[in-house]
Image: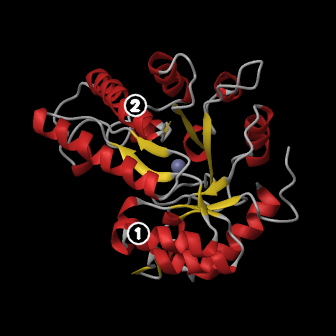
Amino acid sequence: MRDFSTDHRWLSINTATVRQQRGQDWPLLDILDACGQRGIRAVSPWRDQVAAAGLQATANKLQEHGIELSGYCRGGMFTYTDAASRQASRDDNRRALDEACTLHAPCLVLVVGGLPGALAGHAAHRDIAGAREQVNEGIAALLDDARERQMPLAIEPLHPMYAADRACINTLAQALDVCDALDPGRTGALGLAVDLYHVWWDPTLAVQIQRAGPDANGDGSRLLAFHVCDWLTPTTHLLEDRGMMGDGVIDIPHIRALVEAQGFAGYSEVEIFSRGNWWRQDGGQVLDTCIERHRRCV
Ligand code: ZN
C-alpha cells in the first residue's frame, strides 16, 4: 500500500467539502486558488459550482494551477415518469459528459436516482424494481454517448438510506451487476466510484472490491474513483453530517489497502458534506485539516 504519511500528492478535494463556508458560497475559482496554494493536485468539482464559475474559466484555472480532476460530479438521476422527463435526463447527462470532457475528467460520477419525485418529497410511485429497470436503461443509453466521447462512467452506489430519493443502486454488488451486464468485456467505459461513506458497512465489501479488480493480465479494472470521509456516531443528518477522516468508525486504511491490492493507484478524494461542523469553518483551515488527516488517517 502507498505511504501517504509524508506528503499529499494523492489527495483530491471534492469541492462540495468546502462549498459553503460560514454560510457563504465559496466560489469554485477561489477554492482552486486555495488548493493550488497548498499543493493539492486534484479536485472533483460539482456541476453547479462549475456553472457558477463558468466552464471555460474553470478549465483555465485548473490549467493555471496544474490541478487535474479525480472525477466530475455528477451525472445520473435516470428515473422518470414520462417521455419528456426521460428525454430531459438524457439531454442533461449528455451535457454533463461534454463538461467532463472539457475539464479532462477521468470519469463522470453517476448518482443514479431513486423513485421519481421522491427527492422533492412526492414519490410518483412505490415501484423500486421499476426504478432500477429505468436506471439500467438510462446507463445503457448514456454508455453509448460516453463511449463516443471516451469518457468513462463511474456508478456510485449510495447507502441504502438514500434508496428512495437519490440512488436505488445501493451496494457494490448491485453496481457491479450493472457493469457486467452492460460492459461484459470490461472495456474501461463503465466502472465504480467507491465511496466509503456508502459502502463501509457491507459484509461483502472485500469480495466485491476483488470482483471489481482487474483480470490476471492487470486489465479491465472497474475501480475508477475512491471517495473518503468518516461515519460519525451518532450521525445527526442523513446527508449533511459526514465526518472528517479519523473522527468516525470507518477503518479507512484497511479499505484503501483492499482497493490498492486490486491495483488502484489513483487519488483519495475527500468528500464531506457537513452543515453543522466543517461548512462552518474557514475554508482554508478545512483544506489544511484534510491534508493533515489524509496523511495520518487515510
Ligand atoms: Zn462520493
**Residue at 68% from the left image edge and 53% from the top image edge:** 268
Q: Position of residue 156 (x, y in %)?
A: 49, 39
Is residue 50 toward the left or the right of residue 217 in the image? left
**Residue at 41% from the left image edge and 42% from the top image edge:** 111
Is residue 83 toward the left or the right of residue 203 in the image? left
Q: Is residue 238 visible?
A: no
Q: Position of residue 197 (x, y in %)?
A: 58, 47
List the residue tagged with mark 1: 56
Seen in the picture, residue 102 relative to 88 is either above or below; the reply is: below
Seen in the picture, residue 253 relative to 272 is either above or below; the reply is: above
Q: Amino acid at mark 2?
A: Leu
Examine the image and state in which quarter residue 82 appears: top left
Is residue 101 toward the left or the right of residue 113 in the image? right
List the residue tagged with mark 2: 143
Q: Amino acid at mark 1?
A: Gln
Determine the CA span between mark 1 and mark 2: 25 Å
Judging depth in this view, the residue of 18 and 71 nearest the camera is: 71
Judging depth in this view, the residue of 73 and 57 nearest the camera is: 57
* Label disc, if present, on residue 185 of the rendered structure: none
